[in-house]
Image: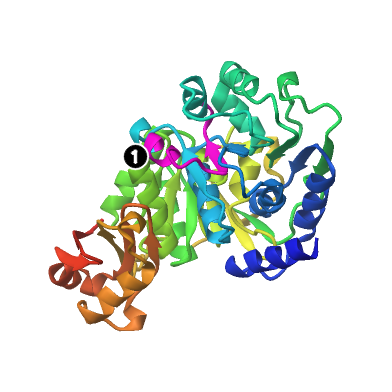
Amino acid sequence: MANSIKEQQEILEKLNIYALNPMQEQAMEAIDKNEKTILLSPTGTGKTLAFLLPLLEQLDPESEDVQALIIVPSRELAIQIETVIRNMGSGYKANAIYGGRSIAKDKIELKHTPFILIGTPGRLLDHFEQARFTTKHIKTLVIDEFDISIEVGAEGEMKQIMSYLANVTKRILTSATPGSSIPKYLNMVGAKTLNFLTEKPSSKLELKTVVSPSANKHNTLVDLLHHVGSDPGIVFCNKKERLEDLSRFLDKKNVAHTCFHGGMEQRDRERALIKLRNGSVSVLIASDLASRGIDIPEMKYIIHYEMPEAIQEYTHRNGGTARVNSKGTAYLIKGDREVFPDFVGKSQTIRIKEGGDIKPPFWITLFISGGRKDKISKGDIAGLFFKQGNITKDQLGVIELKQDCAFVAVPVSIADDLVGKLNNVRLKKKKVRVSVI
């Protein structure tokens, strides 16, 4: 065990984590000791790490088959978990497969069988039915955000997936929502349940209401965005049509933002999150898809442009800020004559100044048409920008490296000049395109 403790410490150091929180420690102990574990804990408390660390200890490095399966409700969550596993640097191969990308890409990656497979229900079932790899060595099953995964996979798909998993010996279900029923086919009778949702909500989350003088809240939102300044935040809407209408209005007002909803192409959703993470925009206009398990930094605030219909979505939205030890604010915009649902609770009504300009972002994002598969590293990209782009260290922002491309944040003022200098240059023997996204 001493050896695994040392390895665990090395993994945490790679993730820049210095200590596990109490939930993670208790969850890891429960997963280690029990065949079946249900982990209920708020969004942003670190559930992913809580199940990944004990999962790694279950793997047999000599095996050449899939040994652990993680079922997730969304593409973003699949990609995020795959990234976390890669950053852990354990040496165990993991692949994320999900709807919205070509089956051909999956087939290429699955030729070298991963130890850990992460996927959305529909895409997983497709591969299972086509017998693209054996499932008989899968011993560990994780269903992350199980209440939503079951919805996304519907009863039929999830039941069929379970029929392929006859040899599972360890089952882990996670959720940030209380009271979700667990279908019998998941075989969780007698499971150890850890419920961290019963604890009092964090006092570090402030609820503030801003009253709009009319039913149309667009101008009030702009005033509120001016009030919060350049801190990153998410504005939640209920429907795609309202979200798109709001986005057009913000464009007219020259408010830099990006959008995120289920109707967008996967590539565009991924780029929206990249822009938010690297500071190219500070405002994300989103549907409730953005309230669960996506890879975004700690938000200083979230805004309920529209109130959700259910308390679960309200809770998940608020979980985007005031995480763990941080402070955060949830703003509620109340339209003329609007009545909030009972679950909202007490909030402080504030007045904000009308009008005012919103400062444009300092950073903008450049796309580079080369990535990991081309043996390109972040160091290679930094070297290119310093040497051939002739920029200084403080002019190089966040670099995100993907399998087949990369994204780099640079100051808006020098972006066009950099594209002129770097487009079609060679990077690690590959001629790359560089453009603004």
Q: Which of the 4 image quarters holds residue 71?
A: top right
Q: Horizontal and vertical percent for residue 285?
A: 42, 47
- Is residue 304 visible in the rendered image? The answer is no
Q: Which residues are magenta?
A: 106-121
What residue is shown at x 63% (from left), y 64% (from top)? 11
Pick the front one: 298 or 153:
153
Count of numbered badges drawn on the protein: 1
Give the vertical position of 173 relative to 396 (above or below): above
Q: Is residue 118 magenta?
A: yes
Give the vertical position of 326 relative to 61 (above or below): below
Q: Is residue 26 magenta?
A: no
Tell me the quarter of the image containing the C terminus: bottom left
Q: Horizontal and vertical percent for residue 179?
A: 76, 32
Q: Is residue 139 left or right of residue 406?
A: right
Query: Quick one: which residue is furthest to the front in this view?
Result: 62
Q: Horizontal and vertical percent for residue 207?
A: 65, 54
Q: Is residue 235 left or right of residue 412?
A: right
What residue is shown at x 75% (from left), y 64% (from top)? 3
Secondary element under disc 1, as helix, strand or loop, is: helix
Q: Which of the 4 image quarters holds residue 280?
A: bottom left
Amino acid tagged 1: Asp
Tell me the quarter of the image containing the N terminus: bottom right
What residue is shown at x 82% (from left), y 51% (from top)? 29
Q: Which residue is mark 1?
A: 245
- Is residue 280 visible in the rendered image? The answer is yes
Q: Is residue 269 left or right of residue 18?
A: left
Give the vertical position of 159 relative to 395 (above or below): above
Query: Quick one: which residue is furthest to the top in this view?
Result: 156
Crowdedness near tag 1: few (<14), some (14–19) or many (≥20) residues, C-alpha within 10 Å: few
